[in-house]
Each structure stands twice: as C-alpha cells, then as structure tokens.
Image (spheres, helix red, strand yellow):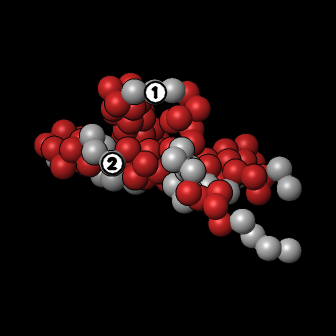
Amino acid sequence: MDFDWNVFSHPKTTFPIWGYGIIHFFGLNKLQVLILQQLLTIYTLLKLDKLLIKYKLISKIELFRLIILMSSTWFLFHTQMWPKSIASNLFIIGSIFSIEFIKSKKEIYLIYSSIVLCITFGQITSIFL
C-alpha cells in the first residue's frame, strides 16, 4: 500500500496542527479567534485560581493574583499564535482536572482530563477506539 503524499499539498490542509481544522470549520475570523483565546485564557486563570484556593496549594493567593495581573507577557502570548495559546490553555485545564482527580478521587475528573488532554495533543480519535 502506497501513501499519497499529495494530500498535504492542498491549500486548506491542516497537517500537522490540529487547531487549524477546527478554526476553519467554525469559520472564525481573526478578531473572533482573538476573543476566543482571551476568553479561554481568562477561564483557565479562574479555574487555576479556584483550584489553588480549594486545596490551599499557595499560601498567599493575593500574591499569585498580583503576579498574574502584572504579567503582560502572559496575555501577549495569548494574543499571538493562537494554536499555541489554545493548546497551552487546554493543557493547563487538563492538568487541573488531573489534580482534581488526584485530590478528590472522583473518576469524572479523570475522564474530563483525558478528553481535554487528548484534544490538546490531537489524539481525540484515540478516545473512541
């Protein structure tokens, strides 16, 4: 069986970055993508903040919040290169679910973590095999 390498020469090909296919599917323009990644970043930070408070992983949560507010590079990173921004946010969210599973032993967090991390690493099809 011979592989047809011409499939990668199509102008709308998404190989090797998974995110391009999703963005093209929804037909998002640059402003919509920017808004999406900033909202995802804010959601990730709120989820991380909630986790840190819930399990008292940082003794001075105000210091963590101040550092995040002052770190313009965090938000600049999430303004550029959207595939990396979305992937890094999904990785953090997947890690948060993993920590929730470890701390609470609730299997639903393990399932959430698996789904999010599989999406992050472009292996979503592995879930259904």
| Disc 1 secondary structure class | loop
Which amino acid, by three-letter code, is at mark 2? Answer: Met
Instruction: For residue 99, say whether it is visible.
Output: no
Nearer to the camera, 74 or 52? 74
Q: Are marks 1 and 2 in contact (CB under 8 Å)?
A: no
Q: Is residue 19 above or below residue 39?
A: below
Task: Tell me where residue 116 appears, x and y as whole percent.
Answer: 61, 47
Q: Which residue occupies 62% across, 49% down?
A: 119
Q: Nearer the viewer, residue 115 or 125?
A: 125
| Residue 8: x %, y % from top left | 59, 58
Q: CA distance from mark 1 to mark 2?
A: 15 Å
Identify the disc placed on residue 28: 1
Q: Is residue 22 visible?
A: yes
Q: Nearer the viewer, residue 39 or 65?
A: 39
Label 2 element class: loop
Residue that extends furthest to the bottom in the rendered view of this protein: 1
Q: Residue at x 51, y 26 (%)?
A: 27
**Neighbourhood count class around disc 2 (C-alpha, 10 Å): few under 14, some 14–19, many 20 upward:** few
Residue 81 is tagged as 2
Q: Quadrant of the N terminus?
A: bottom right
Residue at figure coordinates x 61%, y 55% from the top left: 122
Quadrant that contains the C terminus: bottom right
Q: Local crowd at mark 1 within 10 Å, few (<14), some, or many (≥20)?
A: few
Give the side of residue 16 with respect to residue 38, left or right: right
The x, y position of residue 33, in whole percent, is 39, 31
Amino acid on which the number 1 mark rests in the picture: Leu
- Between discs 1 and 2, the one toward the N terminus: 1
Placement of 79 over or under 100, stated as above or below:
above
In the drawing, what numbered circle is on residue 113?
A: none
